[in-house]
Image (spheres, rainbow, N blue to C red):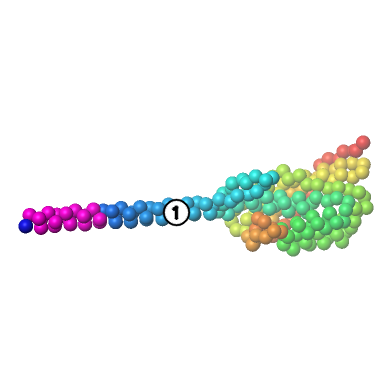
Amino acid sequence: MFKKLNNIDTAFRHVRAFTLVVVVASTLVCVYALYQSFKTVNRMQDKIYVLANGKAIEAYASDRRDNIQVEARDHVRNFHQYFFTLDPDDKVIRQNITKALYLADNTAKRVYDDLKESGYYSGIISGNISQEVVIDSVQVNISGYPYYFRCYARQQIVRPTSVMTRILVTEGNLRNVSRSDNNPHGFLIERWRTIDNKDISTENRN
């Protein structure tokens, strides 16, 4: 009888130990599964799918600091292309200038007002003149804030009888602002000024 009780006690201990191992193992598996799930969700949140020409292209989200140089240069480039790309069409001029002024403060607005008052834009229209800007390089210093930039470019002024090329060098600062449809990079150009803008060549048109 005592032998049977010992066997029952031994069996009970074995069952209890086995049950404890199963419970611990199940707990570890559940914890690992939860960890992997959260890790996968966080990784998926860093992925963006862009639909282009009917195809889903995978992109990855990154911290702004990783791309600040690229975004700052593109902001400066866009501003200059909008501000200096002009055609003999009042509507086109207003559209481009409006886009440019969303990217800069009142220093750019003052330059626009001065040019408008001097008859520069009306001369573009009446003279059938087209103007475009070619950006050579944009340098941005992000070691201090607001970020200083300098833009090196060339203006090409196409008249009915000639094509004039002018050098254009400007500088200013970039301040962080909220992103929007009108300002996708979230920068605002401040203290913008032209430091060099002179003729370098003129070619006659046939």
- Count all numbered tags in the image, as a single digit: 1
- From this viewpoint, which residue is outermost toward the top? 206
For image coordinates 26% across by 53% down, the residue present is 21
Position of residue 204 relative to residue 43, above or below, is above
Looking at the figure, which quarter contains the C terminus?
top right
Question: What is the span of residues highlighted in magenta in the rendered image?
Answer: 3-20
Q: Is residue 180 left or right of residue 129?
A: left
Looking at the figure, which quarter contains the N terminus?
bottom left
Callout 1, which amino acid?
A: Ser
Q: Position of residue 137 (x, y in %)?
A: 69, 45
Q: Is residue 196 left or right of residue 33?
A: right
Q: Residues within 10 Å of mark 1 (few under 14, many from 20)?
A: few
Q: Main secondary structure of the magenta part?
A: helix
Give 197 or 36, whichever is nearer the viewer: 36
Q: Position of residue 79 (x, y in %)?
A: 73, 53
Question: Is residue 26 a member of the stretch shown in magenta?
Answer: no
Q: Position of residue 130 (x, y in %)?
A: 86, 47
Give 8 or 123, whichever is nearer the viewer: 8
Question: Residue 53 occupies which quadrant of the picture?
Answer: top right
Give 16 or 158, whichever is nearer the viewer: 16
Q: Position of residue 165 (x, y in %)?
A: 82, 43
Q: Is residue 37 left or right of residue 55?
A: left
Kindly tell me whether residue 87 is visible in this rendering.
yes
Name the residue carrying label 1.
37
